[in-house]
Image (tube, rainbow, N blue to C red):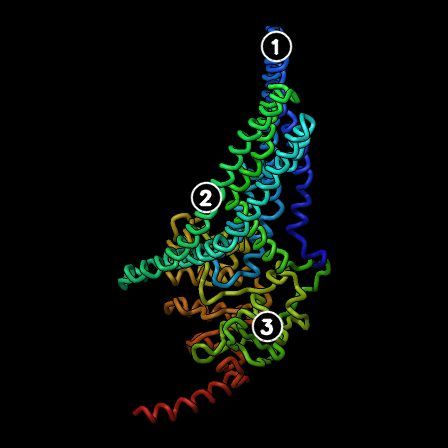
Amino acid sequence: MDSKSRIVKDALRACRRYFLVAAAFSLAINLLYLASPLYMLQIYDRVVTSGSETTLVMLTLVLLAAFLSLAGLDLVRAWILTRASARLDRLLSAKILAASVETPSPGSSPSQPIRDFDTFRQVITGSGIHALFDLPWSPIYIGIIFLLHPWLGFFALGCSLLLIAMAVLNEYLVRSPLKQANELATTNYNFTEMSLRNAEVVRAMGMIDGLIRRWGRDRNLALRRQAEASDRAALMSGIIRFLRLTMQSLILGLGAYLVIERQITGGTMFAASLLLGRGLQPVEQIVGLWRSLILARAALARVEKLVDGGARSERSFNLPKPSGKISVEQVSFAIASQQKVLLREVSFRLEAGEALGIVGPSGAGKSTLARHLAGVMQPSRGTVRLDGADLSQWGHDALGDHIGYLPQDIELFSDTVAANIGRFKTNVDQEVIEAARLAGVHEMIIRLPQGYETQIGEGGAVLSGGYRQRIALARAVFGTPNLIILDEPSSNLDADGDRALSDCAIELKRRGSTVIIVSHRPSTLANVDKILLLRDGAVEAFGMRNEIVALLNQRAAPMAVATQ
């Protein structure tokens, strides 16, 4: 893996000092835990035998001071890990969101990577991470038990190895069903989100009962796998708790035997039991929290795959502003998982300032080609060039300043009209108004309750379909880009909207912008210079508008006669 593909690891490394400090605090905390067995040892071996009340008071005060320091250090350690989580969020959350936009995972919720990241961050601030920090210090307790008596030490060492073996067995038993349960749950969540997005269709066509049956099938399967994993984890957790409690009691029995043999004192016997319990406690805690730790590990792996796998180098060389000349060279695109070819060897050229109409039957690949022209998708083979440079040579931010794109499925954001048109840039009020005027939507916007500051709701819910499309058109022409791709820009427009769209296309051409329009409406293509006819993903015809229109009319005439 090269240096540009280590974004997550670099972020974790940047937080390393937080974890190192937390580890140092963990050492101090675990040393302070020795106060309790030492207190027990001194009480039985010194205070009880001497009857000294002064010694008892002083030992008790020292114990309380140790416990107070322990609580304070534990609190500070929690604060440190919380800061580490916040620092990690500042370093990665924006990059995860950017990677989710640039390389979305098919079939998964767009917000899943952020949810995965939050799952991992919550583990950093939870009790599970404390147990992980305490686990490396367990050998300290075993070593001290060896100092008390070798037999007690070997017994404690054997107990530790047994619990570690049980923890490994727990990982083996739980990992597979838990992974399946998590994958099925993610699929079910995605289906739920899709169902809620289409709630109007579900209600209108009486699909609720069938939808619930379909939803319940996946959810029940996920619950069965989750129950299997939880049952196994609960069984192992119960066994480990039984073993820990039994071991703590058995070490008392072994200690009692050694006391009878006069090899150790009574205080040593009780101190060994406390030390063993503390040494084994992190193992028990980790097994109890194993499910959340596995989910966090899997979530981090998915985030790393998304961010590092799609990492692109930051481009330090800025290409000059393009004129809008575009060339498509033998572009093909196929979905490997479906073995379906959507584009086949598509080639054409446009000079700066020309307007192209893309037509063809449904499923011909028109929208797929539009996405390639906008740089949203990368071809399987071939190249799309803007002023001779491959689109992949442009940084996404730099390319976005020179491209306007109106997708077929309009997506507006839950913010103001101005923020949507201005692409969330600041101090661009005049540019926003200019874009709205160019799209013929300025007069419509100022009639809204708060004008350009009107909140449009989730996906533009407070606006009609035509309003949303015209605002999206204004966003596409914001800043008068050199290349503008409009995919079915008139699908929701009335006669006034069609006229505004036509005027907008004429003005864009006058300003020198290259305009590409995908449409089924002949009126929308009245002002284009050339037409590209796609069929089954391949170019069937490409040429001047009048030539292609005549060709289409010739093909339509025999069909009209045949139907008479």
Q: Nearer the viewer, residue 212 or 194?
A: 212
Residue 243, horizontal then vertical, whole percent? 52, 37
Cα distance between the residues tagged 3 and 1? 86 Å
The residue type indicated by label 3 comes to Pro
Residue under label 1: 49
Residue under label 2: 234
Query: Which type of secondary structure does the marked residue at label 1 adopt?
Result: helix
Residue 169, horizontal then vertical, whole percent? 55, 48
Query: Could you classify mark 1 by the number of other residues whose Cα lies within 10 Å: few (under 14), some (14-19), or many (20 or more)?
Result: few
Query: Could you classify mark 3 by the number of other residues whose Cα lies within 10 Å: few (under 14), some (14-19), or many (20 or more)?
Result: many
Q: Earlier in the sequence, mark 3 or mark 2?
A: 2
Residue under label 3: 379
Visible residue check, residue 98: yes
**Along the horizontal axis of the image, is 172 left or right of 153?**
left
Residue 183, horizontal then vertical, whole percent? 48, 57
**Along the horizontal axis of the image, is 515 left or right of 208?**
right
The residue type indicated by label 1 comes to Thr
Viewport quadrant of the C terminus: bottom left
Q: Nearer the viewer, residue 128 or 136?
A: 136
Residue 259, above or below 337: above
Residue at the spot 46% in from the left edge and 80% down from the top edge: 360
Q: Earlier in the sequence, mark 3 or mark 1?
A: 1
Q: Nearer the viewer, mark 3 or mark 2?
A: 2
Query: Could you classify mark 2 by the number of other residues whose Cα lies within 10 Å: few (under 14), some (14-19), or many (20 or more)?
Result: some
Cα distance between the residues tagged 3 and 2? 49 Å
Viewport quadrant of the N terminus: bottom right
